[in-house]
Amino acid sequence: MLLLAGDIGGTKTTLAVFSPEAGARQPLAEATFPSGDADSLESIALAFFDQLKLDLDEVDRACFGVAGPVVDGTCKITNLPWEMSETQLAARLDLKQAKLLNDLVAIAHCIPILEGDDLYTLNRGERDPEGNIAILAPGTGLGEAFLVWDGTRYLPLASEGGHADFAPINAVQLGLLRYLQERFEHVSSERVCSGMGVPNIFAYLKDSRYSEEPEWLKQKLAQAEDPTPVIINTALEDPLSSELCDATLDVFISIIGAEAGNLALTVMSTGGVYLGGGIPRRILPALETVTFMQSFQRKGRLSNLMARMPIHVIMNPKAALLGAARYGLSMG
């Protein structure tokens, strides 16, 4: 029998079919759908089956990595108006079993099978083969998770640390916090350390008169459906054309480094720190600057400990999908 696995995000939903024989790294079929165009995961799954001309009787179980907290087998997607439950999914898709995993837990399940080109190392460090592992994923939102060694294998554990309070580390970030406190009831790390965070940082720097916004940039941002790629691409490809974009990316990198360091300290991740999500892959050149490592390591008396922690960027964009598949294929 086959497994339906999925990576369910606020922007897009990727579904794939796997077999026990081919394993978690070899989907038999795969497709991606805009999440916002559908009213439920079930409707996307049925459209996927119809597209494949696949008989529902050939699939007996499903496992989905979902962008939101999973509690008692239920989840409300953080950046979508979807509510789902394992029981409901199994019934509507006529499955023997359905499992929901937080998307970062799904990525965590994938960590042990990542290899070679799946990873890019920012800091080789000194890996403890049985040490805890931290995962930070800035994407549409900010996901966090970690793995602990139980004596024989790594166990993934969920976290909603991305919604914890933003902790500024310098005067600029303190000003950013105060600026956002006037606009939001709660300023979480996600407000400044994700795709939604980039425009927030840009707006603060612009409104605080850090630099003038060029007319061409103003027009480009006005025409963009999402300002984040415009700001990031400008900073990466032509930093001299806009001080605002360049400074925005620099502050953003500093915040990612500090937040990754906070998570690494919290879970004592001597087994390594992994950066997932779409943004780290896109801004890899900026992550290799001293800004990221300085912010990550600057933890007072524990700075030397931080310097020894390995740090990797997950380059495989299907990590959550493969992790959901790996878990799903192991379900009894």
Image (spheres, grey):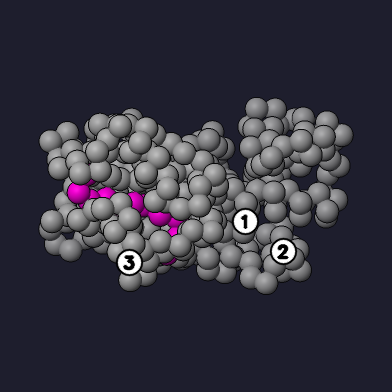
Q: Is residue 22 left or right of residue 63?
A: left
Q: Is residue 29 left or right of residue 20?
A: right
Q: CA distance from mark 1 to mark 2?
A: 9 Å
Query: Would you place residue 229 above or below residue 107 in this image?
Result: above
Q: Look at the numbered discs 2 and 3 and tell me whether their residues touch, using CB distance below 8 Å.
A: no
Query: Would you place residue 299 above or below residue 193 in this image?
Result: below
Q: CA distance from mark 3 to mark 1?
A: 30 Å
Q: CA distance from mark 2 to mark 3?
A: 34 Å
Which mark is drawn over residue 180? 2
Verify whether residue 66 appears in magenta. Answer: yes
Residue range (magenta): 59-70
Q: Position of residue 232 (x, y in %)?
A: 64, 38
Return the disc, 3 or 1, that comes first in the chain's sequence. Answer: 3
Q: Position of residue 268 (x, y in %)?
A: 35, 63
**Nearer the viewer's eye, disc 3 or disc 1?**
3
Disc 3 element: loop
Q: Is residue 46 left or right of residue 253?
A: left
Disc 1 crowd rating (10 Å Cα; few below 14, some 14-19, many 20+) is many
**Residue beneath disc 3:** 73
**Residue beneath disc 1:** 192
Query: Would you place residue 75 above or below residue 110 in this image?
Result: below
